[in-house]
Image (cartoon, grey):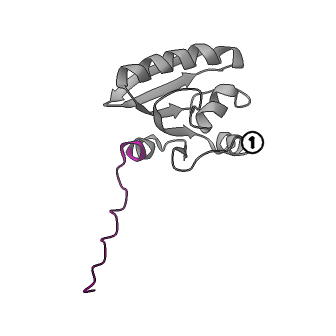
Amino acid sequence: MSVRIRKAEGRLLDVTVLGSMEDRDRQDVLSALQTRIRECGSARVVVDAEKTLSPRPPEFWREAAAGFPTLRNVERVAIVGDQSWQTALSEEPRGTDAETVRFFESGMKPRALSWLRGEGKRAPEPEKTEHE
């Protein structure tokens, strides 16, 4: 297993896992991720699962799907991977918070990054005045 955690821009961290990640790898990866988050103050994280070979989502991915509740200062998490991972993770009892965690199909990393940056959001509706 190889994990790359890099600061993509601003508070955006890009986590790429290559190969098979086992539950025993979880704490090392979470510690490294927490160190990078501390450097940023708070972070938005994209987790790239496209090249992961694990036969089932290990605990690390379940934590990602729950928004990394054991880590501090994670604002949003985007998980990029195939449909089978999304299905497996959505069946977790912890569930996901649609406001802070989103799944994106393989090949949709640019869209995931855009969501993390807050791009493409609708503008708020203007407030109505008494004259309208």
The one of 37 and 131 positioned closer to us in this rendering: 131
Query: Which quadrant of the figure contains the N terminus?
Result: top right
Q: Amino acid at mark 1?
A: Pro
Mark 1 crowd level (few <14, some 14–19, many ≥20, 10 Å Cα): few
Is residue 131 found left or right of 118 in the rendered image? left
Which residue sits at x=69%, y=27%?
Answer: 59
- Residue that sits furthest to the left in the current view: 131
Which residue sits at x=50%, y=27%?
Answer: 72
Q: In the picture shown, does residue 95 fall above or below 8? A: below
Query: Which quadrant of the figure contains the C terminus?
Result: bottom left
- Residue that sits furthest to the front in the current view: 130
Q: Splitting the image into 4 quarters, where does residue 130 fall?
A: bottom left
Q: Which residue is mark 1?
A: 93
* Magenta span main SS: loop
Residue 90 drawn at (x, y percent):
68, 45
- Magenta residue check for 102: no
What residue span does the magenta drawing correspond to? 114-132
Is residue 19 found left or right of 10 in the rendered image? right
